Amino acid sequence: MNLNETHDPNRRSFLAAANETGCDFPIQNLPLCIFRRAAEPPRGGIAIGDQVLDLTAALAAGLFVGQAEEAARAAAGPTLNPLMALGNRHASALRARAAELLSAGNVDEARVRRALVPVAAARFEVPARVGTFTDFLCSIDHTLRMSRTGELPPAFRHLPIAYHSRASTVTNAATIHRPNVQFRDKDGVVRFAPEPSLDFELEMAAWVGIGNVMGEPVPLAAAPDRIFGYCLLNDWSARGIQGWESAPLGPFLGKSFATSISPFVVTAEALLPFRTKRRERTADEPKPFAYLTTPEDAEAGGLDLALTAYLVTPRMRLEGSAPAVVTRTNFRYMYWSFAQMLTHHASNGCSLQPGDLLGSGTTSGPTDESRACLAEISRRGATPLNLPNGETRAFLDDGDEVIFRGRAERNGFIGIGFGECRARISPAVEWPPHGAGR
């Protein structure tokens, strides 16, 4: 993939909202989504300003031809998996034609406008059927802060560490239930009760496009073209049970109850202007094995993405206060690139499929401001976070709402965003075993 006319900073849309400074979805972005209106079935769309281009309606109006039409038909159904399976060339053709249709001065503007749906009138779905969700551990700063020994796991600098989580609980639901869990309390008593230390983790995720046949690895040079697009991800973490259950096999129920994602897929092509150097290794760090390094990945494997986490408490909501910023970080701090994650994932012959989701792990950076989860911010609860209204949080309370936003900016280009990844914590579901003992 290369920069092309879709990245032209001088291009403008006939939709005024798409041309506003700070708009997440200018004509240089055009992320894909799955949406529905009222009782209608879900269908594919492309976000632009404060509207969504309904691909079903656009196809019926004859607005797509050739490869772009084939791509639009693959994206118009209830999931984006068929388009992901076609790969990035088809996605590029669709994006190029959509940019033409939505540009100022387009002679087909009237027909295009009839295929637009206001974002406010749409309900957004998880954009693809997730076959497998793999979550990595790619921040050296997060890993060191969360280490009980103050040291990195022996393998961290040699390979992207990961675990498989639960694909069926990847969601963009507005609420997340606090899970019922088993944990050991501060007095050493093992209990079963609502999770006492619920946390968020600010992450990015990559959607797999064209997969690989079982037994055939994916070379690093080919990995970027296997990444279809990106979204924001909240790896909700039940720290109480996580600490109790993780030895010796790692996370299980502490992670699998819910994973929130933003509903818009920002394509790999849209993010090309914002690629940057992968985090450089110091002289005393081991060099990556040959299968995990190329000059291209070293020079442009990283992404310059500003990531922000906000918190809204019930009291703040009642008072009408603005969301409080709790984290400001950037994806460029990551030790491993998404291409390295994908290549290592498939290095043993593991088969990846269209719609598989790869999480980056917590995106913490080296500064206090860039701590990307409450366990880091509050130092495992020892130093609670002070909010602007005087409230404090060591971990999340019921009614708290967590909001993630991401934005890519670079001189000479129009900045693009990801929309929001947002969810509120609701109380644990009442379940008879509570308080029943063993």
Image (cartoon, helix red, strand yellow):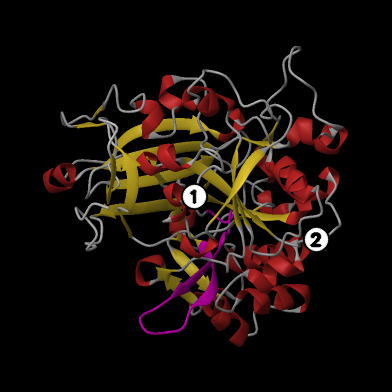
- Position of residue 278 in the picture relative to residue 219 (left or right): left
Q: Which mark is residue 212?
A: 2
- Which secondary structure, mark 2? loop
Marks 1 & 2, CB-CB < 8 Å contact: no
Residue at screen point 43% across, 57% down = 17
Residues 213 and 49: in front is 213
On the image, the x and y values in percent for residue 210 come to 76, 62
- Position of residue 250 in the picture relative to residue 404 (left or right): right
- Position of residue 22 in the picture relative to residue 222 (left or right): left
Give the magenta-colored segment's residue range: 26-47
Residue at screen point 76% across, 60% down = 351
Magenta-colored stretch includes residue 32: yes
Q: Which mark is residue 252?
A: 1
Q: Amino acid at mark 1?
A: Phe
Image quarter of residue 412: top right
Please say if 418 is above or below 62: above
Magenta-colored stretch includes residue 252: no
Image quarter of residue 390: top left
On the image, the x and y values in percent for residue 111 come to 55, 80
Tag 2: Cα neighbours inside 10 Å, few (<14), some, or many (≥20)?
Answer: some
Q: Which mark is residue 177?
A: none
On the image, the x and y values in percent for residue 258 come to 42, 56
Tag 1: Cα neighbours inside 10 Å, few (<14), some, or many (≥20)?
Answer: some
On the image, the x and y values in percent for residue 208 come to 68, 57
Q: Earlier in the sequence, mark 1 or mark 2?
A: 2
Disc 1 from disc 2: Cα separation? 27 Å
Is there any visible trace of residue 185 in the rendered image?
yes
Residues 115 and 45: in front is 45
